[in-house]
Amino acid sequence: MAETVRLYYLFRGLSSALLFKTFLVFFYLESGLNFAQIGILHSVFAATVILLEVPTGIWADRWGRGRVMGYGALAMAFAALGYTFLSGFWGFAFLEFLLAFGLTMTSGADSAFLYDALKRAGQEKEYADLEGKAGFAKHVGMATSALAGGFLAEIDLSYLFPASAIVVFLAYVAIRRMDRSLPSEHTHVFQGSPVRLCEALGQFETQKGIWWTVFYSALIFMFIRSSDTLLQPVLRANGYSYWKIGLAAAVSAMAAAVASRHTAGMMRKFSERSLLWALPAVLIVSYALFATGTGWVLALLFFTNVSVQGIYSPFTKTLLNRAISRSNLRATLLSMESSVKRMVVALMMPVVGVVVDRWGLSAGIMACVAAACVAGVVLLFTAPRRRDAVELPDQASTSEPGAGDLPLSSPACPASRPFSSPSK
């Protein structure tokens, strides 16, 4: 079990270390694209995730999380290398598709992989703490890649892509070792993906806290995804060189790593309500101030914005995982959550891009702030009552490992007969 967890951390760190991530917007701008086109590329990425997130989650549930995660790392490595050979809007659109395809094979499957590995060992109560540590590894990978990417970008932006491909390929090597380190077992899976999807949708109907948490997650994710397109260009316009932007991103990512590492402790120390509303409030305020800030204030606001993002993933994933009672649907439901938040990005980013092209970066940032305020009000008035809310780890009732794993028929879904299939 210890080896599995260590390799899981290594995979999360390496698969997140895309050296070009912080600087991709500059590469697109230097290639002749405007912000509206960049927004459309974001939509291509998001639409790919929306279409493939649930199917890849089903594949992970059915054929093995480790195997699918490895294929995802390979796809991301090929996408990174592709920027060396392809150019133009349509070439970039294909690479965004391939990168998103790779991401869908790791998103959801990774958290489900860890949670069920812990559940088999009777240690699922440790999930929040270990997911926080995995988030720490992820942000360390992002920090290291941002710092190294800043210096490579000073030489040539094109150097970022083959370097990223090498690093992400190492993530594939790590996941293959982790896959072999797991004991063989048999799990119950559905014979048909439509039945599994129908049962997963049934979880949204019966678990009222899930859908609210999914849309809450989408609100936070909008800031995370838009920051790469909007905040870095503001820093560049205010005289920050590539290496300084990389340094700011690295320091901020390390702060996010620390925040992620201690999320479980904060969840035990503070109330659920406090954390729920503190995260979007800080992001909204920091974005609004970023639109009008200058000089070192921008670096401070950038630091604050990225630091808060470190809490987001382990916090929301813990809420969702605790609400999901059936392990054989876990990756599918987490993938559905990812699809919803990407849908928000697909709708927002082209609009924001048009606003930036017409009225400037500050107007685009404020458009995100306005949309977030509206969404926040809706979430506030639709928040589940306490008895329907998603349970936190210290509030959740314990259950025997494996409870709820067997597929159940429901009036809305056709009955299905499970069969045993090896899961590696």
Image: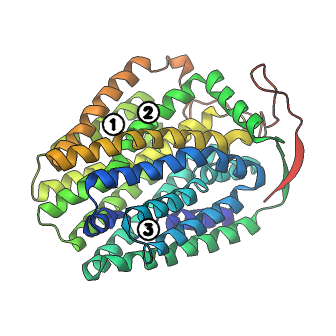
Tell me the crowding category of disc 3: few under 14, some 14 to 19, or many 20 or more residues within 10 angstroms, Cα based: many
Please give the name of the residue rendered at 51% of the width and 56% of the height, measured from the top-left corner.
Answer: 100
Of the residues shown, which amino acid type is indicated by label 2?
A: Tyr
Q: Answer left or right for 207 relative to 163.
A: right
Question: In the rendered structure, which disc, 3 or 2, sits on the residue that comes first in sequence?
Answer: 3
Please give the name of the residue rendered at 51% of the width and 61% of the height, measured from the top-left corner.
Answer: 99
Residue where numbered disc 2 is placed: 216
Tell me the crowding category of disc 1: few under 14, some 14 to 19, or many 20 or more residues within 10 angstroms, Cα based: many
Asked if the residues shown at circle 1 and circle 3 are in contact, with their CB atoms under 8 angstroms apart, the answer is no
Please give the name of the residue rendered at 69% of the width and 67% of the height, measured from the top-left corner.
Answer: 178
Name the image quarter holding the N terminus. Answer: bottom right
Tag shown at residue 280: 1
Query: On screen, 90 above or below 241?
Result: above
Q: Secondary structure at mark 2?
A: helix
Query: Can you give x and y, in whole percent of width and height, for residue 370 in the image?
Result: 25, 32
Residue where numbered disc 3 is placed: 18
Query: Can you give x and y, in whole percent of width and height, for residue 314 in the image?
Result: 50, 46
Of the residues shown, which amino acid type is indicated by label 3?
A: Leu
Gap between marks 1 and 2, in whole Å?
A: 9 Å
Query: Can you give x and y, in whole percent of width and height, for residue 304 in the image?
Result: 26, 50
